[in-house]
Amino acid sequence: LTMISLCSAALFSSVNAYANCDAGEIVIKFSHVTNTDKHPKGIAASLLEQRVNTEMNGVACMEVFPNSTLYDDNQVLEALLNGDVQLAAPSLSKFEKITKKYRIFDLPFLFADVDAVDRFQNSASGDKLKNAMKRRGLIGLEFWHNGMKQMSANKPLILPSDAKGLKFRVQASDVLVAQFEQLGANPQKMSFKEVYGGLQTKVIDGQENTWSNTYGKKFFEVQDGVTETNHGILDYLVVTSGDWWNGLPSDVRDQLATILKEVTETRNSESSLVNETNKQNIINAGGVVRQLTPEQREEWVTALKPVWKKFEKDIGSDLIEAAQKANM
Ligand code: LMR
């Protein structure tokens, strides 16, 4: 019941704010799936909304729909192409049906940390990836950081063999499916909004996510604990439809792009701090966080390394090398 009333409260306030758009303003609906405060994406989207509505008042009006109130990530790209929303920021794991290049971001233990991801995204090869879906009508505007993923389950995860036989929720990515199969676990693709219920009803045993998602959606409450594996990255692409973007008056497009770029730089530099805070929030709320010794972590690295080979052809070994260079 609480969930239902929370959802309708969120929807009501969205509808209200939307009604504040003036006639003649370009309406920009931004749909995403996470919580708003204490979350790298939620904070960035709110800041973008606030700046657009202040600085572009009279010209454009932005309305953010968080918490999957409007669309799931598996519906939102279609909604962009249909013109039902104008902006979204799905995780990079969710572009699989449109490009195989983004599989680079899901390879386990490829990036040492978010700084390495940042360097790669800002390199020539990373930047090129924003345009990988142009032919499919989508334009990538900016990469937004969330952070490194951690693993949780209904039993302690210390060695790779602990994951054997467990059912793990994964985002809609074949690399992530392969990752858990490599551990002898059973991966299941599931939308973000179904994860808490899935864990609670034991349809799934575990999941992987960032501290901010694990805290923001309270997954830790229905798990034995979270192991700090830092085994992969969860980042986003702020994406729009080419038709809509190219149809904007050029001064409007430029101003929007500038605001978005500034919000990206400001918030990306804070994402690690937001995640650290959420790790502490989990501990403060009574959640269990487990650390691995360097030797234990190395066992996970060794166990998961074979996944790279499976996707090398789709991604291209040159791109994998470029990503590895970003670790140095
Ligand atoms: C997930 O589905 O776990 C994440 O992609 C959710 C999000 O947007 O961070």
Image (cartoon, helix red, strand yellow):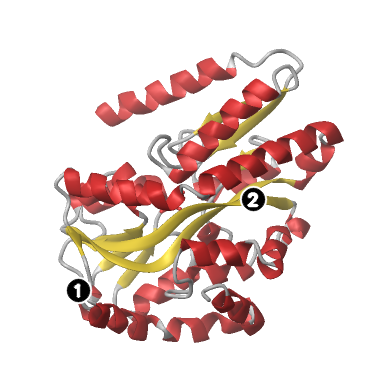
Label number found at residue 183: none
Kindly report the distance in space between the C-alpha atoms of the residues bearing marks 2 and 1. 36 Å
Q: Position of residue 76 (x, y in %)?
A: 57, 44
The kind of residue tagged 2 is Glu
The quadrant in which the N terminus is found is top left
- Asked whether the residues under the numbered discs 2 and 1 touch, taking CB atoms below 8 Å apart as contact, a structural biologist would say no
Mark sitting earlier along the chain (2/1): 2
235 sits to left or right of 231: right
179 sits to left or right of 103: left
Determine crowd level at label 2: few under 14, some 14-19, many 20+ residues with C-alpha closer than 10 A. many
240 sits to left or right of 299: right
As helix, strand or loop, the secondary structure at mark 1 comes to loop
Q: Which residue of the protein is positioned furthest toward the front in this rendering? A: 328
The kind of residue tagged 1 is Ile
Residue 146 seen in render: yes
Q: Position of residue 230 (x, y in %)?
A: 36, 66
Residue 96 seen in render: no
Mark 2 lies within 8 Å of ligand 1 (Cβ measured): no
Determine crowd level at label 1: few under 14, some 14-19, many 20+ residues with C-alpha closer than 10 A. some
Which residue does the image show at 52% across and 50% down from the upper left?
74
Mark 1 lies within 8 Å of ligand 1 (Cβ measured): no
290 w.r.t. 82: above or below: below
Which residue does the image show at 43% across and 35% down from the upper left?
36
Q: Position of residue 246 (x, y in %)?
A: 82, 42
Which residue does the image show at 76% across and 57% down from the upper left?
134
Nearer to me, 200 or 102: 102
49 w.r.t. 319: above or below: above
Q: Mark 2 points at which residue?
A: 142
Q: Mark 1 points at which residue?
A: 158
